[in-house]
Image (tube, rainbow, N blue to C red):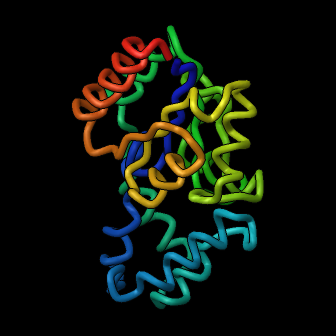
Amino acid sequence: MIKAIIFDCFDVVLSDGFEAAYAKFGGDSTKDREFLHQLIQDVSSGKIDGSSSIIALRLGITEAEWREANFAGYVINTPLLDYALELKKTYKLAMLSNVGKGGLKRFFDPGFLERYFDPVVESAAIGYAKPEARAYEIVAGMLGVRLDECVFIDDRQEYVDGATAVGMQAVLYKSVSQLRDDINNILEEGDENGK
């Protein structure tokens, strides 16, 4: 039986402006894929404190220019959060985001995320980043549920695969309507199987 639903943040709850900002200053996220992936992993696992200064240096701009352009592209997915509130009436909700310590506070007002999710987990704060098994295990433990009682939602296939590898059900996020359909199918299947 499903008892908890765990959401990713970037490109799920919050549209991600990173690639557009990176391209604005001449960056090529496809060509720089390996560099960016490693940088994000280092920040997400808490190995380094942040990426803004490193990206600004690579692009030949100031850190302030990078932050302004990058943050301008982020938009809160209100329809998704409305759906999360519906789910919260029946299920425990959490957020697990690959982000540096304190990184989410740059995007959300104090207390905003806590209206929807309990807990809100930044990967760097726990020392494990998706798709590491411990990241999923820690969040399930915080919720007081087993891994097989969770549905995990993310826009990246590797993170969805990480969740299924530890026994969670998972949904690759594309849109709110697609998510609703996929979650309903999982929940209905669980009811039919008595899980």
For this orientation, the residue located farthest to the front is 193
Residue 169 placement (x, y as % from top left): 46, 37
Task: Measuring from the top left, give residue 62's x and y in whole percent.
Answer: 53, 81
How many labels, in total? 0
Residue nearest the viewer, comparing 105 with 14: 14
Residue 64 vertical position relative to residue 129 in the rendered view, above or below: below
Viewer-nearest residue: 149 or 52: 149
Is there any visible trace of residue 112 in the rendered image? no
Residue in the picture at 46% in, 64% down: 68
The answer to whether residue 95 is left or right of residue 139 is left
Q: Position of residue 189 (x, y in %)?
A: 35, 20
Q: Residue at x 73, y 68 (%)?
A: 49
Q: Is residue 38 left or right of residue 28?
A: right
Q: Position of residue 103 (x, y in %)?
A: 64, 54
The residue sitting at the top extreme is 89
Instruction: Look at the picture and state if 148 lies above or below 128.
Output: above
Q: Nearer the viewer, residue 61 or 127?
A: 127
Please report the residue visible at 43 percent of the width from the left and 64 percent of the height from the top: 70
Q: Quadrant location of residue 82?
A: top left
Q: Quadrant of residue 17?
A: bottom left
